[in-house]
Amino acid sequence: MSILNGKPLFSLSIKASDVRAFIEVNGIYVHTVNSSSGSSSVEIPVNHYFHPETNYLGVVVFPLAEGEKRSAKSTVNLTLSVKSDENPNNKYDIAEIEYRASQDDPSGYNGSNSPVFLSSIDAFAEKDEGDVVVHPVVVDDSEGISISRKIEVPNSLPVWGFFESDDLPDYFRISKDDYARDKDALYEIYKVIEQSLSVGEVDEILDLFEERNRETDQAFYLDQGETRDSLKQSFLSSVNNENIQLLESDSIKFGLRPEPGRKLVRFIRADRRGAIAFNFIGEEGSVRYDLVFRKQDGEWIISR
């Protein structure tokens, strides 16, 4: 039986050097690369962003600093892999995207110009009757260098809520009033969380994270309620830690960072990091919690 029909665990291996890049899965930036010196390597799980049928991977490459040119040594490599939760020792590579600044045409070194068929019941070997289809890359250099790839990979994961949510506006182009309206709406939800954490009432806010917790349980085959309990313990640990203090702020300190697929938006602080912040007392650093929202039928929902 194909591992895709069991309990698949999808992950992205990201290797980069001398580059600043955004890694994208289905219209969501899942990782940021900033390898200003030397190289970096990381592997991240992506089940909670994956669709049960068709998925899109991408990388957008920028210079290390604004106004500069991309380094001639810049490289980025993404490899999508899958393994079974029941047998994690066997991992199979499905698709790859590569960027090399030393070569002009990414299409030329990113595989075939025709779709490639892989068989998930035969170790993802190339076969004409394969159930997985890896499409050729699409290259766009209008803003940075963007390389994306469509992959048809039927699997047993459910359709996550954000795939079916409302399209969000282009927050970089809408009016200040429209931007402020959505920012203020998310600030009101944030403020409820902040006020509860400030008095240690963690149980009062866990229901706000219901979709995020439930879908994380499903994505990684956890027992029902496991992610909720983990979040509760993490909040309690921060609240009871005498070395950190909850940062309470008014709405001016916040902004919106939309995901490129316009299904999710991050509510962030002015430093572009997670909205819920516990700062260390007397030293640099903080403990952060992200707030990622979607909208459906006029209601804002914490999705991730």
Image (cartoon, helix red, strand yellow):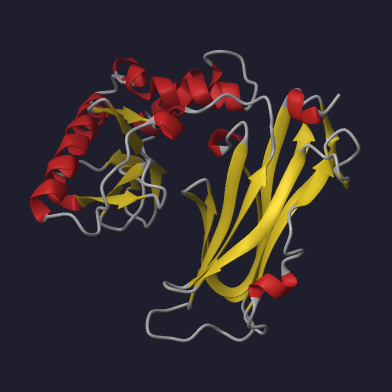
- In the displayed structure, 97 sits above or below 253; it is below
Can residue 141 be seen here? The reply is yes
Can residue 81 be seen here? The reply is no
- In the displayed structure, 273 sits above or below 5; it is below
Instruction: Depth check: give the residue in front, 75 or 25.
Output: 25
Return the residue found at the far top.
Answer: 224
- Residue 47 in the image: x percent, y percent? 61, 35
- Residue 210 in the image: x percent, y percent? 40, 20
- Residue 118 in the image: x percent, y percent? 82, 44
Q: Residue at x 29, y 23 (%)?
A: 200
Of the 4 image quadrants, the one containing the C terminus is top left
Instruction: Depth check: give the residue in front, 11 or 290.
Output: 11
Of the 4 image quadrants, the one containing the N terminus is top right
Q: So how many labels did they put on this image?
A: 0
Q: Residue at x 85, y 43 (%)?
A: 124
Q: Residue at x 88, y 45 (%)?
A: 127
Left or right of 119 on screen, residue 28: left
Left or right of 132 on screen, residue 253: left
Q: Quadrant of residue 197?
A: top left
